[in-house]
Image (spheres, rainbow, N blue to C red):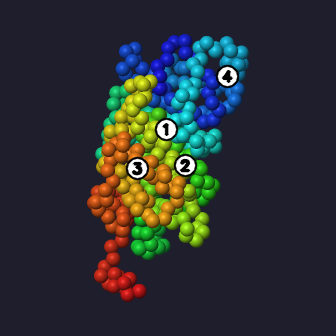
């Protein structure tokens, strides 16, 4: 994000493909900012995307087809060329690494009505009340003066994210089977891929990237919660991970190439934890500070999942080479950047858990008679 002056008319030389446009108006002193508003676009060669700044509403608005055509023609005639800033190609590599699974179809499937993503439309998400200390800190940050939600009734446009249940519920199966399904959510991932993603792993990973960008750049609490739900789901798919850990097992139709997820997560955290953003202004620092200091603490869900995952992968005797490589890179990133340590301190069947851990597996406690029957069988 950068500051613009009165003669600024837009950006030119944008590489083809998806991009995220986000902005925030400021007061005269430049120290108070309105909530960030963002939207995805899909740029094409020689294409022109037109938005006009609405002074009263302090946001970018779409124009009529006739007006858009006139502006597009003027741009192609280079009438605005001296007022267009060039796209920063030095950062294009970073952008590609955190958005390479996002397509035009991804945007069309998830974006809200009107396309605008903003915390102003998420009052219901904030009002529900975060369940963890990190989420509470995030909500408080978003509700400070520069991120405050206006008193008037907010808009209800929200993104159409895939529904990710925290717990698998099924009254037709036994308690032990239900415990197993909540302990290992591979079957849940398979069901989501089949129902909502046309069986394509690219779509679910594209949504993971969409949510991360909408949170980090658009400062959307709803996007953060969706990103968290997807990361939690992937890390809970023990069977899917095991197929990559033991690649010599008989053929099995994997729901996903698991190292794709680890690679995407690595690049997301690598980007989010960068310390050298010299052009980052105050309006963008909110999410960056949170990414570094709040929900990425050793008490966060991510630390707990990574701790179990690293133990599972790095102690395996036979493992897929790509999964091993990207797991090591992710571990080194978290240790080097955040100072995290991953020593197994408590385990039940290799799964770390605490009494108040909302991500701990659902455990079915068997009575003595049931245990005896299980042992005898």
Mark 4, secondary structure of its residue? helix
Asked whether residue 330 is in view, the answer is yes
Q: Work out whether residue 3 or residue 242 is closer to the camera in this orientation and state it.
A: 242
**Measuring 61% from the left and 54% from the top, which residue is drawn there?**
200
Residue 239 position within the rendered picture, expressed as x and y whole percent measured from the top left: 49, 65
Q: Reading the chain from its start, which is encountered first: label 2 or label 4?
A: 4
Mark 3, secondary structure of its residue? helix
Residue pointed to by mark 4: 68
Residue pointed to by mark 2: 205
Residue pointed to by mark 1: 214
Compute the Cα span from label 1 to label 2: 14 Å
Q: Between label 1 and label 3, give the one nearer the viewer.
A: 3
**Measuring 44% from the left and 72% from the top, which residue is drawn there?**
177
**Measuring 38% from the left and 59% from the top, which residue is drawn there?**
311
Residue pointed to by mark 3: 331
Mark 2, secondary structure of its residue? helix
Residue 116 position within the rendered picture, expressed as x and y whole percent measured from the top left: 53, 33
Are the residues flagged by discs 1 and 2 in contact, CB closer than 8 Å? Answer: no
Compute the Cα span from label 1 to label 3: 25 Å
Compute the Cα span from label 4 to label 1: 26 Å
Residue 342 against residue 171 in the figure, above or below: above
Q: Work out whether residue 111 or residue 207 is closer to the camera in this orientation and state it.
A: 207
**Measuring 36% from the left and 65% from the top, which residue is drawn there?**
350
Are the residues flagged by discs 2 and 3 in contact, CB closer than 8 Å? Answer: no
Residue 35 position within the rendered picture, expressed as x and y whole percent measured from the top left: 43, 29
Compute the Cα span from label 4 to label 3: 48 Å
């Amino acid at each position: 994000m950068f500051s613009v002056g009165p003669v600024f008319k837009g950006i030119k030389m944008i590489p083809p493909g998806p991009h995220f446009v986000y902005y925030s108006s400021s007061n005269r002193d430049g120290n108070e900012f309105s909530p960030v508003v963002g939207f995805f676009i899909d740029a094409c060669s020689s294409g022109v995307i037109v938005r006009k700044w609405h002074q009263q509403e302090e946001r970018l608005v779409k124009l009529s087809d006739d007006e858009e055509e006139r502006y597009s023609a003027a741009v192609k005639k280079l009438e605005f060329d001296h007022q267009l800033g060039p796209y920063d190609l030095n950062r294009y590599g970073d952008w590609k690494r955190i958005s390479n699974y996002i397509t035009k179809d991804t945007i069309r499937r998830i974006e809200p009505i009107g396309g605008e993503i903003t915390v102003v439309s998420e009052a219901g998400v904030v009002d529900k009340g975060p369940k963890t200390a990190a989420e509470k800190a995030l909500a408080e940050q978003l509700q400070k003066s520069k991120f405050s939600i206006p008193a008037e009734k907010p808009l209800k446009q929200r993104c159409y994210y895939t529904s990710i249940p925290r717990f698998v519920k099924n009254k037709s199966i036994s308690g032990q089977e239900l415990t197993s399904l909540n302990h290992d959510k591979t079957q849940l991932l398979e069901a989501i891929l089949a129902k909502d993603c046309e069986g394509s792993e690219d779509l679910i990973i594209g949504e993971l990237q969409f949510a991360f960008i909408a949170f980090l750049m658009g400062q959307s609490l709803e996007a953060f919660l969706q990103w968290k739900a997807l990361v939690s789901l992937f890390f809970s798919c023990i069977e899917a991970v095991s197929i990559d850990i033991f690649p010599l097992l008989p053929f099995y139709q994997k729901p996903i190439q698991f190292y794709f997820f680890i690679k995407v997560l690595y690049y997301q955290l690598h980007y989010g934890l960068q310390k050298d953003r010299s052009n980052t202004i105050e309006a963008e620092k909110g999410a960056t500070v949170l990414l570094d200091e709040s929900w990425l603490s050793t008490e966060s869900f991510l630390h707990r999942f990574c701790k179990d995952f690293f133990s599972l992968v790095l102690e395996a005797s036979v493992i897929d080479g790509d999964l091993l490589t990207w797991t090591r890179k992710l571990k080194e990133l978290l240790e080097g950047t955040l100072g995290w340590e991953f020593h197994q301190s408590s385990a039940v069947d290799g799964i770390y858990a605490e009494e108040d851990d909302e991500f701990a597996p659902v455990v079915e406690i068997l009575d003595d008679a049931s245990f005896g029957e299980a042992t005898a069988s």
